[in-house]
Image (cartoon, grey):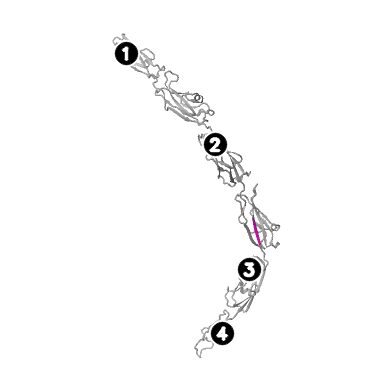
Protein backbone atom coordinates (compact mmCIF):
# COMPACT_ATOMS: atom_id res chain seq x y z
CA UNK A 1 0.00 0.00 0.00
CA UNK A 2 1.01 3.59 -0.69
CA UNK A 3 -0.22 6.76 1.09
CA UNK A 4 -0.31 10.40 0.15
CA UNK A 5 -2.02 13.65 1.22
CA UNK A 6 -4.26 15.95 -0.81
CA UNK A 7 -6.60 18.90 -0.06
CA UNK A 8 -7.31 21.20 2.05
CA UNK A 9 -5.12 24.35 2.20
CA UNK A 10 -3.10 25.08 4.21
CA UNK A 11 -2.95 21.63 5.85
CA UNK A 12 -0.61 20.07 3.22
CA UNK A 13 1.90 22.90 3.98
CA UNK A 14 2.25 21.92 7.61
CA UNK A 15 1.65 18.12 7.66
CA UNK A 16 3.08 15.09 5.83
CA UNK A 17 2.44 11.30 5.68
CA UNK A 18 4.84 8.40 5.43
CA UNK A 19 4.12 6.73 2.06
CA UNK A 20 4.56 3.20 3.36
CA UNK A 21 3.53 3.31 7.03
CA UNK A 22 0.78 5.92 6.73
CA UNK A 23 2.07 7.85 9.77
CA UNK A 24 0.95 11.48 9.67
CA UNK A 25 3.48 13.99 11.02
CA UNK A 26 4.11 17.77 11.33
CA UNK A 27 6.27 18.86 8.46
CA UNK A 28 6.53 22.61 9.25
CA UNK A 29 6.42 24.82 12.38
CA UNK A 30 2.74 25.51 13.04
CA UNK A 31 3.61 28.82 14.60
CA UNK A 32 4.52 30.04 11.13
CA UNK A 33 0.94 29.73 9.94
CA UNK A 34 -0.17 33.26 9.27
CA UNK A 35 -3.78 32.12 9.66
CA UNK A 36 -3.05 30.73 13.10
CA UNK A 37 -5.77 28.03 12.52
CA UNK A 38 -6.81 25.97 15.47
CA UNK A 39 -7.83 22.93 13.28
CA UNK A 40 -6.65 21.44 10.02
CA UNK A 41 -8.36 18.85 7.66
CA UNK A 42 -6.19 16.40 5.69
CA UNK A 43 -7.43 14.15 2.84
CA UNK A 44 -5.39 10.92 2.74
CA UNK A 45 -5.40 8.68 -0.38
CA UNK A 46 -4.38 5.02 -0.23
CA UNK A 47 -3.56 2.93 -3.40
CA UNK A 48 -2.30 -0.59 -4.27
CA UNK A 49 1.20 -0.47 -5.65
CA UNK A 50 0.29 -3.16 -8.20
CA UNK A 51 -2.87 -1.47 -9.30
CA UNK A 52 -2.34 2.21 -8.56
CA UNK A 53 -5.58 3.16 -10.26
CA UNK A 54 -7.47 1.52 -7.51
CA UNK A 55 -7.58 4.15 -4.69
CA UNK A 56 -9.38 4.89 -1.45
CA UNK A 57 -9.49 8.09 0.63
CA UNK A 58 -10.13 9.17 4.16
CA UNK A 59 -10.29 12.54 6.07
CA UNK A 60 -7.97 13.27 9.01
CA UNK A 61 -8.99 16.12 11.40
CA UNK A 62 -6.18 17.66 13.45
CA UNK A 63 -6.84 20.18 16.29
CA UNK A 64 -3.97 22.50 17.32
CA UNK A 65 -3.69 23.96 20.85
CA UNK A 66 -2.51 27.53 20.33
CA UNK A 67 -1.45 30.20 23.01
CA UNK A 68 -1.25 27.79 25.85
CA UNK A 69 0.32 30.21 28.37
CA UNK A 70 -0.72 33.62 29.64
CA UNK A 71 1.68 36.41 30.66
CA UNK A 72 2.83 36.25 34.29
CA UNK A 73 4.00 39.32 36.28
CA UNK A 74 7.16 38.94 38.31
CA UNK A 75 5.44 40.65 41.30
CA UNK A 76 1.90 40.40 42.50
CA UNK A 77 1.95 44.07 43.40
CA UNK A 78 4.27 47.07 43.09
CA UNK A 79 4.83 50.04 45.39
CA UNK A 80 6.35 53.40 44.54
CA UNK A 81 6.82 56.73 46.34
CA UNK A 82 6.88 60.03 44.50
CA UNK A 83 6.68 63.72 45.38
CA UNK A 84 3.76 65.88 44.41
CA UNK A 85 6.23 67.73 42.19
CA UNK A 86 7.05 64.59 40.16
CA UNK A 87 7.62 65.67 36.54
CA UNK A 88 5.39 64.28 33.81
CA UNK A 89 6.86 61.57 31.61
CA UNK A 90 9.52 60.56 34.13
CA UNK A 91 9.49 56.86 35.06
CA UNK A 92 7.88 56.04 38.40
CA UNK A 93 8.04 52.24 38.28
CA UNK A 94 8.35 49.54 35.61
CA UNK A 95 6.16 46.43 35.66
CA UNK A 96 7.37 43.28 33.90
CA UNK A 97 5.49 40.19 32.74
CA UNK A 98 6.84 37.06 31.00
CA UNK A 99 5.01 34.68 28.56
CA UNK A 100 6.24 31.12 28.18
CA UNK A 101 4.89 31.06 24.65
CA UNK A 102 8.10 32.10 23.03
CA UNK A 103 6.63 33.91 20.08
CA UNK A 104 4.10 35.91 22.06
CA UNK A 105 4.69 39.61 22.70
CA UNK A 106 3.39 41.08 25.97
CA UNK A 107 1.40 44.33 25.86
CA UNK A 108 0.47 46.44 28.90
CA UNK A 109 -2.68 48.45 29.52
CA UNK A 110 -3.82 50.63 32.42
CA UNK A 111 -7.13 49.90 34.10
CA UNK A 112 -8.49 50.96 37.46
CA UNK A 113 -10.30 53.93 38.92
CA UNK A 114 -10.94 57.29 37.36
CA UNK A 115 -7.99 59.12 39.02
CA UNK A 116 -5.60 56.41 37.92
CA UNK A 117 -6.77 56.91 34.37
CA UNK A 118 -6.61 60.71 34.76
CA UNK A 119 -3.07 61.08 36.04
CA UNK A 120 -1.06 57.97 35.02
CA UNK A 121 0.11 56.32 31.85
CA UNK A 122 1.76 52.93 31.15
CA UNK A 123 3.92 52.35 28.12
CA UNK A 124 2.30 49.36 26.29
CA UNK A 125 5.63 47.97 25.20
CA UNK A 126 7.95 48.58 28.19
CA UNK A 127 5.56 48.60 31.15
CA UNK A 128 7.03 51.89 32.44
CA UNK A 129 4.51 53.83 34.51
CA UNK A 130 4.71 57.65 34.51
CA UNK A 131 2.56 60.72 35.05
CA UNK A 132 0.59 62.17 32.17
CA UNK A 133 -0.77 65.05 34.24
CA UNK A 134 0.48 67.03 37.28
CA UNK A 135 -0.74 65.82 40.68
CA UNK A 136 0.36 68.94 42.61
CA UNK A 137 -3.18 70.27 42.84
CA UNK A 138 -4.67 66.94 43.81
CA UNK A 139 -4.82 65.92 47.46
CA UNK A 140 -4.79 62.14 46.97
CA UNK A 141 -2.04 60.52 49.05
CA UNK A 142 -2.30 57.01 47.52
CA UNK A 143 -3.14 55.98 43.96
CA UNK A 144 -4.05 52.36 43.09
CA UNK A 145 -3.33 51.38 39.49
CA UNK A 146 -4.42 48.12 37.83
CA UNK A 147 -2.02 47.06 35.07
CA UNK A 148 -3.01 44.30 32.64
CA UNK A 149 -0.63 42.26 30.51
CA UNK A 150 -1.96 40.56 27.33
CA UNK A 151 -0.24 38.48 24.69
CA UNK A 152 -2.94 39.08 22.05
CA UNK A 153 -4.69 42.36 22.73
CA UNK A 154 -8.18 42.35 21.19
CA UNK A 155 -8.08 38.64 20.15
CA UNK A 156 -10.62 36.21 21.50
CA UNK A 157 -7.98 33.64 22.34
CA UNK A 158 -5.65 36.20 23.97
CA UNK A 159 -4.31 35.43 27.44
CA UNK A 160 -4.29 38.12 30.18
CA UNK A 161 -3.05 38.72 33.70
CA UNK A 162 -2.98 41.77 35.98
CA UNK A 163 -1.02 43.32 38.83
CA UNK A 164 -1.58 46.22 41.19
CA UNK A 165 0.67 49.29 41.47
CA UNK A 166 0.37 51.45 44.60
CA UNK A 167 1.76 54.96 44.16
CA UNK A 168 2.25 56.85 47.44
CA UNK A 169 2.48 60.65 47.39
CA UNK A 170 3.57 62.22 50.72
CA UNK A 171 1.49 65.36 50.96
CA UNK A 172 2.85 68.25 53.08
CA UNK A 173 -0.29 69.39 54.79
CA UNK A 174 1.23 71.68 57.39
CA UNK A 175 4.33 73.92 57.48
CA UNK A 176 6.91 73.52 60.27
CA UNK A 177 6.08 75.17 63.60
CA UNK A 178 8.77 77.32 65.30
CA UNK A 179 9.56 77.41 68.98
CA UNK A 180 9.54 81.14 69.68
CA UNK A 181 13.10 82.36 70.35
CA UNK A 182 13.98 85.04 72.87
CA UNK A 183 15.59 88.34 71.84
CA UNK A 184 19.36 88.24 72.05
CA UNK A 185 21.91 90.88 73.15
CA UNK A 186 25.49 90.61 71.95
CA UNK A 187 28.63 92.68 72.00
CA UNK A 188 29.80 94.35 68.81
CA UNK A 189 33.13 92.57 69.39
CA UNK A 190 31.49 89.16 68.93
CA UNK A 191 33.88 86.98 66.96
CA UNK A 192 33.11 86.01 63.40
CA UNK A 193 31.40 82.56 63.33
CA UNK A 194 30.45 82.78 66.99
CA UNK A 195 26.92 81.52 67.70
CA UNK A 196 24.14 83.97 68.59
CA UNK A 197 20.92 81.93 68.89
CA UNK A 198 19.31 78.68 67.76
CA UNK A 199 16.10 78.42 65.75
CA UNK A 200 14.07 75.23 66.28
CA UNK A 201 11.04 74.10 64.30
CA UNK A 202 8.97 70.89 64.33
CA UNK A 203 7.01 69.48 61.39
CA UNK A 204 4.20 67.01 62.25
CA UNK A 205 4.13 65.60 58.70
CA UNK A 206 7.86 65.73 58.05
CA UNK A 207 8.86 63.81 54.95
CA UNK A 208 12.53 64.75 54.72
CA UNK A 209 14.27 66.94 57.27
CA UNK A 210 13.69 70.46 58.51
CA UNK A 211 15.97 73.01 56.84
CA UNK A 212 16.52 76.66 57.76
CA UNK A 213 17.24 79.72 55.62
CA UNK A 214 17.95 83.35 56.52
CA UNK A 215 15.64 85.48 54.38
CA UNK A 216 15.95 89.03 55.79
CA UNK A 217 15.96 91.83 56.79
CA UNK A 218 18.61 94.25 55.47
CA UNK A 219 21.36 94.53 56.62
CA UNK A 220 21.11 91.41 58.79
CA UNK A 221 22.07 89.07 55.95
CA UNK A 222 25.40 90.88 55.63
CA UNK A 223 26.32 90.23 59.26
CA UNK A 224 24.61 86.95 60.18
CA UNK A 225 24.10 83.49 58.70
CA UNK A 226 22.13 80.45 59.78
CA UNK A 227 23.22 76.82 59.54
CA UNK A 228 20.75 75.12 57.21
CA UNK A 229 20.57 71.88 59.17
CA UNK A 230 20.94 72.94 62.82
CA UNK A 231 19.21 76.33 62.77
CA UNK A 232 22.11 77.92 64.69
CA UNK A 233 22.54 81.64 63.95
CA UNK A 234 26.17 82.79 63.58
CA UNK A 235 28.00 86.09 63.08
CA UNK A 236 29.04 86.35 59.43
CA UNK A 237 31.12 89.55 59.43
CA UNK A 238 32.49 91.85 62.12
CA UNK A 239 29.65 93.95 63.50
CA UNK A 240 32.10 96.83 63.86
CA UNK A 241 32.25 97.05 60.06
CA UNK A 242 28.58 98.03 59.82
CA UNK A 243 28.62 101.53 58.36
CA UNK A 244 25.14 102.10 59.80
CA UNK A 245 26.34 101.14 63.29
CA UNK A 246 22.97 99.46 63.82
CA UNK A 247 22.04 98.70 67.40
CA UNK A 248 19.29 96.24 66.41
CA UNK A 249 19.04 93.66 63.65
CA UNK A 250 15.78 92.01 62.58
CA UNK A 251 16.55 88.38 61.77
CA UNK A 252 13.96 86.55 59.64
CA UNK A 253 14.42 82.79 59.21
CA UNK A 254 12.36 80.37 57.12
CA UNK A 255 11.94 76.68 58.01
CA UNK A 256 10.72 74.05 55.56
CA UNK A 257 10.55 70.32 54.92
CA UNK A 258 13.37 69.41 52.55
CA UNK A 259 10.89 67.34 50.53
CA UNK A 260 8.49 70.28 50.28
CA UNK A 261 10.63 73.41 50.15
CA UNK A 262 7.75 75.69 49.15
CA UNK A 263 5.69 75.11 52.30
CA UNK A 264 7.52 77.41 54.69
CA UNK A 265 7.15 78.95 58.11
CA UNK A 266 8.78 82.27 59.10
CA UNK A 267 10.17 83.35 62.46
CA UNK A 268 11.68 86.71 63.44
CA UNK A 269 14.32 87.41 66.09
CA UNK A 270 15.65 90.74 67.32
CA UNK A 271 19.40 90.84 67.96
CA UNK A 272 20.45 93.88 69.97
CA UNK A 273 24.07 94.97 69.71
CA UNK A 274 25.94 96.79 72.42
CA UNK A 275 27.96 99.40 70.58
CA UNK A 276 31.30 100.68 71.86
CA UNK A 277 31.15 98.76 75.15
CA UNK A 278 34.69 99.62 76.21
CA UNK A 279 36.33 102.96 76.90
CA UNK A 280 40.07 103.46 76.31
CA UNK A 281 42.13 102.27 79.30
CA UNK A 282 45.53 103.72 80.20
CA UNK A 283 48.34 101.35 81.11
CA UNK A 284 48.76 103.12 84.49
CA UNK A 285 46.53 104.94 86.95
CA UNK A 286 48.86 107.95 86.78
CA UNK A 287 52.17 108.95 85.23
CA UNK A 288 55.07 110.91 86.71
CA UNK A 289 58.64 111.73 85.87
CA UNK A 290 61.48 114.09 86.74
CA UNK A 291 63.44 116.09 84.25
CA UNK A 292 66.24 118.59 84.61
CA UNK A 293 65.67 122.27 84.09
CA UNK A 294 68.23 121.88 81.28
CA UNK A 295 66.09 119.26 79.48
CA UNK A 296 66.44 120.07 75.76
CA UNK A 297 63.48 121.61 73.96
CA UNK A 298 62.13 119.30 71.25
CA UNK A 299 63.03 116.12 73.14
CA UNK A 300 60.44 113.51 74.06
CA UNK A 301 59.73 113.37 77.80
CA UNK A 302 60.22 109.80 79.12
CA UNK A 303 56.69 108.88 80.22
CA UNK A 304 55.50 106.07 77.87
CA UNK A 305 51.86 107.14 78.00
CA UNK A 306 49.77 104.41 76.40
CA UNK A 307 46.05 103.55 76.26
CA UNK A 308 44.32 100.57 74.68
CA UNK A 309 40.72 99.94 73.64
CA UNK A 310 39.29 96.42 73.78
CA UNK A 311 36.92 97.37 70.97
CA UNK A 312 39.92 97.84 68.69
CA UNK A 313 39.11 101.51 68.12
CA UNK A 314 41.79 103.96 67.07
CA UNK A 315 42.71 106.13 70.05
CA UNK A 316 43.31 109.87 69.92
CA UNK A 317 45.05 111.76 72.74
CA UNK A 318 44.36 115.29 73.98
CA UNK A 319 46.11 117.34 76.67
CA UNK A 320 44.09 119.28 79.24
CA UNK A 321 45.76 121.99 81.35
CA UNK A 322 46.38 125.66 81.86
CA UNK A 323 48.00 127.96 79.33
CA UNK A 324 51.48 127.42 80.77
CA UNK A 325 51.18 123.69 80.25
CA UNK A 326 50.02 124.12 76.67
CA UNK A 327 52.88 126.60 76.13
CA UNK A 328 55.61 124.31 77.39
CA UNK A 329 54.42 120.88 76.26
CA UNK A 330 53.13 119.27 73.06
CA UNK A 331 51.13 116.01 73.00
CA UNK A 332 51.14 113.89 69.85
CA UNK A 333 47.44 113.05 69.31
CA UNK A 334 48.23 109.78 67.53
CA UNK A 335 50.67 108.03 69.87
CA UNK A 336 50.49 110.00 73.15
CA UNK A 337 54.14 111.05 73.22
CA UNK A 338 54.80 114.26 75.19
CA UNK A 339 57.46 116.69 73.99
CA UNK A 340 58.99 119.80 75.60
CA UNK A 341 58.17 122.82 73.44
CA UNK A 342 60.56 125.41 74.92
CA UNK A 343 63.35 125.82 77.45
CA UNK A 344 62.34 125.42 81.07
CA UNK A 345 64.53 128.40 81.93
CA UNK A 346 61.58 130.51 80.84
CA UNK A 347 59.63 129.30 83.86
CA UNK A 348 60.30 129.11 87.57
CA UNK A 349 57.82 126.31 88.22
CA UNK A 350 59.17 123.19 89.83
CA UNK A 351 56.29 120.94 88.70
CA UNK A 352 53.60 120.73 86.03
CA UNK A 353 50.34 118.84 86.61
CA UNK A 354 48.33 118.05 83.52
CA UNK A 355 45.54 115.76 82.36
CA UNK A 356 45.67 113.58 79.26
CA UNK A 357 42.43 112.38 77.73
CA UNK A 358 42.16 109.33 75.45
CA UNK A 359 39.16 109.13 73.13
CA UNK A 360 37.95 106.36 70.81
CA UNK A 361 36.18 108.89 68.56
CA UNK A 362 33.20 106.58 68.01
CA UNK A 363 29.86 107.81 66.77
CA UNK A 364 27.25 108.15 68.04
CA UNK A 365 28.63 107.10 71.44
CA UNK A 366 32.15 108.40 72.09
CA UNK A 367 33.95 107.07 75.16
CA UNK A 368 36.95 108.68 76.86
CA UNK A 369 39.34 108.12 79.75
CA UNK A 370 41.52 110.64 81.56
CA UNK A 371 44.79 110.16 83.45
CA UNK A 372 46.88 112.54 85.54
CA UNK A 373 50.49 113.35 84.64
CA UNK A 374 53.00 115.08 86.94
CA UNK A 375 56.29 116.40 85.58
CA UNK A 376 58.72 117.53 88.30
CA UNK A 377 61.48 119.96 87.28
CA UNK A 378 64.78 119.46 89.03
CA UNK A 379 66.09 122.99 89.30
CA UNK A 380 69.74 123.47 90.35
CA UNK A 381 69.34 126.37 92.75
CA UNK A 382 72.19 125.45 95.13
CA UNK A 383 75.83 124.81 94.09
CA UNK A 384 77.75 121.80 95.44
CA UNK A 385 79.38 122.20 98.88
CA UNK A 386 82.75 120.86 99.91
CA UNK A 387 82.90 118.79 103.07
CA UNK A 388 85.90 119.60 105.37
CA UNK A 389 87.59 121.94 102.92
CA UNK A 390 90.34 123.05 102.50
CA UNK A 391 92.11 119.72 102.37
CA UNK A 392 95.60 118.77 103.54
CA UNK A 393 97.65 115.64 103.11
CA UNK A 394 101.17 114.51 103.92
CA UNK A 395 102.97 112.23 101.56
CA UNK A 396 106.25 110.40 101.37
CA UNK A 397 108.33 111.08 98.34
CA UNK A 398 108.62 107.30 98.00
CA UNK A 399 104.85 106.76 97.44
CA UNK A 400 104.32 104.52 94.38
CA UNK A 401 102.51 105.71 91.26
CA UNK A 402 98.67 105.22 91.36
CA UNK A 403 98.60 105.14 95.17
CA UNK A 404 95.81 107.18 96.74
CA UNK A 405 96.80 110.51 98.32
CA UNK A 406 93.47 111.81 99.56
CA UNK A 407 89.78 111.78 98.63
CA UNK A 408 87.87 115.04 98.57
CA UNK A 409 84.09 114.92 99.02
CA UNK A 410 81.32 117.35 98.10
CA UNK A 411 77.50 117.23 98.38
CA UNK A 412 74.66 118.89 96.49
CA UNK A 413 71.18 119.30 97.99
CA UNK A 414 69.53 119.65 94.55
CA UNK A 415 71.68 117.33 92.53
CA UNK A 416 70.55 117.06 88.93
CA UNK A 417 73.03 114.55 87.61
CA UNK A 418 76.13 113.37 89.45
CA UNK A 419 79.06 115.21 91.02
CA UNK A 420 82.15 115.51 88.85
CA UNK A 421 85.66 116.35 90.12
CA UNK A 422 88.73 117.77 88.39
CA UNK A 423 92.20 119.18 89.24
CA UNK A 424 92.81 122.70 88.03
CA UNK A 425 96.03 124.48 88.72
CA UNK A 426 99.58 125.17 87.74
CA UNK A 427 102.54 122.85 87.36
CA UNK A 428 104.28 121.13 88.93
CA UNK A 429 101.37 119.96 91.15
CA UNK A 430 99.08 119.10 88.23
CA UNK A 431 101.97 117.13 86.68
CA UNK A 432 102.46 114.80 89.64
CA UNK A 433 98.88 114.12 90.66
CA UNK A 434 95.60 113.17 88.97
CA UNK A 435 91.98 112.94 90.18
CA UNK A 436 89.29 110.32 89.51
CA UNK A 437 86.45 112.31 88.00
CA UNK A 438 83.56 110.43 89.58
CA UNK A 439 84.97 109.75 93.07
CA UNK A 440 87.14 112.80 93.92
CA UNK A 441 90.11 110.52 94.76
CA UNK A 442 93.53 112.11 94.17
CA UNK A 443 96.34 109.72 93.20
CA UNK A 444 100.08 109.86 92.36
CA UNK A 445 100.61 110.34 88.64
CA UNK A 446 104.45 109.97 88.48
CA UNK A 447 107.43 109.33 90.84
CA UNK A 448 107.85 112.14 93.37
CA UNK A 449 111.49 111.66 94.39
CA UNK A 450 112.89 113.43 91.33
CA UNK A 451 111.78 116.76 92.80
CA UNK A 452 112.86 118.74 95.83
CA UNK A 453 109.65 120.64 96.46
CA UNK A 454 108.42 120.20 99.97
CA UNK A 455 104.76 120.83 99.20
CA UNK A 456 102.23 121.07 96.34
CA UNK A 457 99.04 123.09 96.24
CA UNK A 458 96.28 121.72 94.00
CA UNK A 459 93.20 123.64 92.93
CA UNK A 460 90.24 121.21 92.61
CA UNK A 461 86.72 121.94 91.35
CA UNK A 462 83.39 120.11 91.60
CA UNK A 463 80.17 120.54 89.58
CA UNK A 464 76.76 118.91 89.04
CA UNK A 465 76.75 117.08 85.70
CA UNK A 466 73.13 118.14 85.33
CA UNK A 467 74.17 121.77 85.54
CA UNK A 468 77.88 121.95 84.67
CA UNK A 469 77.90 125.74 84.50
CA UNK A 470 78.11 126.06 88.28
CA UNK A 471 81.53 125.05 89.66
CA UNK A 472 82.91 125.28 93.21
CA UNK A 473 86.66 125.11 93.93
CA UNK A 474 88.91 124.49 96.91
CA UNK A 475 92.57 123.72 97.54
CA UNK A 476 94.41 120.61 98.49
CA UNK A 477 97.85 121.14 100.11
CA UNK A 478 100.15 118.12 99.91
CA UNK A 479 103.25 118.26 102.15
CA UNK A 480 106.17 116.04 101.08
CA UNK A 481 108.39 114.05 103.39
CA UNK A 482 111.75 114.06 101.65
CA UNK A 483 115.02 112.25 102.48
CA UNK A 484 113.40 110.29 105.21
CA UNK A 485 116.12 107.69 105.50
CA UNK A 486 119.95 107.73 106.16
CA UNK A 487 122.21 105.50 104.08
CA UNK A 488 122.87 102.10 105.65
CA UNK A 489 126.08 100.03 105.15
CA UNK A 490 125.92 96.34 104.68
CA UNK A 491 127.96 94.76 106.13
CA UNK A 492 128.89 97.26 108.79
CA UNK A 493 132.58 96.06 109.12
CA UNK A 494 135.09 95.47 106.35
CA UNK A 495 138.70 93.99 106.60
CA UNK A 496 141.47 93.93 104.04
CA UNK A 497 145.22 93.15 103.95
CA UNK A 498 147.63 95.05 101.76
CA UNK A 499 151.43 95.12 101.20
CA UNK A 500 153.51 98.14 101.95
CA UNK A 501 154.73 97.89 98.45
CA UNK A 502 151.26 98.22 96.86
CA UNK A 503 151.15 101.08 94.45
CA UNK A 504 149.09 104.16 95.02
CA UNK A 505 145.61 103.91 93.57
CA UNK A 506 145.24 100.20 93.90
CA UNK A 507 141.71 99.08 94.98
CA UNK A 508 141.74 97.61 98.46
CA UNK A 509 138.04 96.87 99.26
CA UNK A 510 134.54 97.93 98.08
CA UNK A 511 132.04 99.12 100.65
CA UNK A 512 128.26 99.12 99.97
CA UNK A 513 125.52 101.31 101.40
CA UNK A 514 121.78 101.63 100.52
CA UNK A 515 119.26 104.43 100.99
CA UNK A 516 115.43 103.93 100.96
CA UNK A 517 115.08 107.36 99.49
CA UNK A 518 116.57 106.06 96.24
CA UNK A 519 116.76 106.68 93.36
CA UNK A 520 118.50 109.77 94.87
CA UNK A 521 122.25 109.10 94.25
CA UNK A 522 124.44 108.09 97.22
CA UNK A 523 127.78 109.82 97.86
CA UNK A 524 130.53 108.18 99.88
CA UNK A 525 132.97 110.23 102.08
CA UNK A 526 135.86 109.16 104.27
What is the span of residues highlighted in magenta in the rendered image?
371-376
Name the secondary structure under disc 3.
Answer: strand
Q: Is residue 453 visible?
A: no
Q: Which residue is mark 2?
A: 177
As drawn, 232 above or below 136: below
The residue positioned 63% from the left and 68% from the top of the image is: 419
Q: Which residue is mark 3?
A: 420
From the top left corner, tell me how far across and down residue 302 is, in percent.
63, 59
Which residue is at the front of the view, 42 or 213? 213
Mark 2, Cα crowd under 10 Å, few <14 / some 14-19 / many 20+, is some
> For residue 313: magenta?
no
Residue named by callout 4: 524
Q: Residues within 10 Å of mark 1 (few under 14, many from 20)?
A: many
Closer to the eye: label 2 or 4: 2
Query: Would you say residue 55 is visible in this rendering?
Result: yes
CA gap, disc 1 to disc 2? Answer: 93 Å
Q: Estimate the spatial distance between the alpha carbons at disc 4 and disc 3, rounded to whole Å.
A: 50 Å
Amino acid sequence: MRYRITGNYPAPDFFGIHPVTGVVFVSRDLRLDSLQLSSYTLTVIASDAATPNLQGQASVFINVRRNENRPVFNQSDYNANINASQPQGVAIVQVTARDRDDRDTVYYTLAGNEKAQQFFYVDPRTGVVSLKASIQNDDTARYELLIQASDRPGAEDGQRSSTRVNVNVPRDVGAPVFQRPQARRINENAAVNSSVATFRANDPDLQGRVLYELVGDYPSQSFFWVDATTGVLFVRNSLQSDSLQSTEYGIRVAAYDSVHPTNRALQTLTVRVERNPSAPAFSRNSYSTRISENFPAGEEIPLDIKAEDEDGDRIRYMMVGDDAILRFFYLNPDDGTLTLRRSLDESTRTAFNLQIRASDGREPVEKTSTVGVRITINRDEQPPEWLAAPYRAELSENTPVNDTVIRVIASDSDLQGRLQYEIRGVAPGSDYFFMEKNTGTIKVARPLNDQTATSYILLVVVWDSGNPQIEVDTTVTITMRRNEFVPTFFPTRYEASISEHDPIGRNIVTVNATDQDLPVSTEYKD
